[in-house]
Image: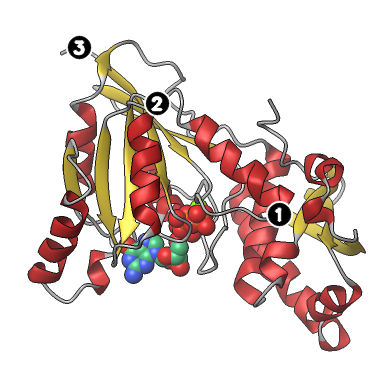
Amino acid sequence: MSHQFAFVGIAGKPNVGKSTLINALIGKKIAITSDKAQTTRHRILGVKTTPDFQLVFVDTPGIHEAKFVLNQMIVKTANQALLDVDVMLWVVDRKKHPYDDKLYQSFKALGIPIILVINKIDVLNNKSDIDQLIMSYLTLGDFEAIIPISAIEKTHLTHLEEAILKHAIEEAPMFPEEYTSDQQEHQIISEWIREKILTLTQEEIPHAVAVVIENIEENKKLKTLDIRALIIVERESQKRILIGKQGSKLKEIGTLARLDLNKTFDRKVHLELWIKIKKDWRNKMQDVMTFGYGESRD
Ligand SMILES: Nc1nc2c(ncn2[C@@H]2O[C@H](COP(=O)(O)OP(=O)(O)OP(=O)(O)O)[C@@H](O)[C@H]2O)c(=O)[nH]1
Ligand SMILES: [Mg+2]
């Protein structure tokens, strides 16, 4: 049998489950997820290889009305990441939103085949709810396929894969078999730490944080990986919240991040976290770029 290949964009509003889906499709955590909107800030490649095909999934930041410079940059990243894909998964969940009409028009304008993926069906009550949701999206226009799934419970993913493969082309794999993601070590570390901050903080804090890795060093004597990271916030009040009572919050963030990092790097990680205030960094292009959100400046 011939070998199939495709680039597959995963796009949609924030918080619909795009990163949960890419992790489920790859079978490994490559992208952080959280219950807060605007979790993903980078384009992340996830590669699935079988003897018959290679699918390169592109997870993108949720597209939203962006006010801060940071958000304008990450929405730009999402839009640019979709330019080169062969097929796109438009992920939606639970309820059609007025913003979906605008989103559909902008996706349609790209001229890329769109598969509508209705996620989180585990929380929909019955089939008629799903049918109603499908009908409401069909008022927008046609789709290559409409696939209801649950990324968390991994239901109907094979069905989704089959729909994607209809848009694959006959081509040799682009990446080696064992290659699963394009994320660099420092990005994985910074994202894993940011995920814990997203989980453990509320309101504006999750959005006001950037994590910069200052140093990664193999400690040959102790056989540990020693990491020093800076958590950037915008104000003194945010710093206080992140530190918590007698340092308890920061300690909790560090402990959870370390457990994840131990697993990812398969060795003991020693993690040192520092907090730094950079006033209004989200609205300053220079800072946004410095903290690693400048992939798509052009
Ligand atoms: N019940 C249910 N929850 C889900 C499912 N998939 C994702 N979620 C939850 O939805 C929330 C958002 O998931 P993410 O994967 O971070 O969403 P995202 O679309 O990548 O969000 P952004 O990166 O902000 O654009 C998390 O709390 C997930 O656990 C699902 O199939 N069922
Ligand atoms: Mg995401």
Is residue 229 depicted above or below 170 in this figure? below
In 3D space, how far apart are the residues under numbered discs 2 and 3 (Cα atoms)? 21 Å
Q: Which mark is residue 68?
A: 1
- Answer with the quadrant where ligand 1 appears in the image: bottom left
Q: Nearer the viewer, mark 1 or mark 2?
A: 1
Locate the C terminus and report the quarter of the image it occupies.
top right
Q: On the image, which quarter does residue 234 sit in?
A: bottom right
Instruction: Report x, y in % for residue 138.
Output: 16, 50
Residue type (three-letter) at the residue carrying disc 2: Val
Left or right placement of residue 100 versus residue 232 in this view: left
What amino acid is labelled 3 in the image? Ser
Viewer can see residue 219: no
How would you rate the neighbour count of disc 1 (Cα within 10 Å): few for under 14, some for 14-19, many for 20 or more?
A: some
Q: Find numbered disc 1 in the image and state the secondary structure of the residue it sits on.
A: loop
Can you tell which quarter of the image residue 123 is in? Answer: bottom left
Residue visible at 80% across and 59% down in the picture: 271
Q: Give the total of numbered labels.
A: 3
Disc number lying in front (1 or 3): 1
Q: Are marks 2 and 3 in contact (CB under 8 Å)?
A: no
Whether the residue under disc 1 has CB within 8 Å of ligand 1: no
Residue beneath disc 2: 85
Please tell me which of labels 2 and 3 falls first in the chain: 3
* Type of the residue with mark 1: Phe
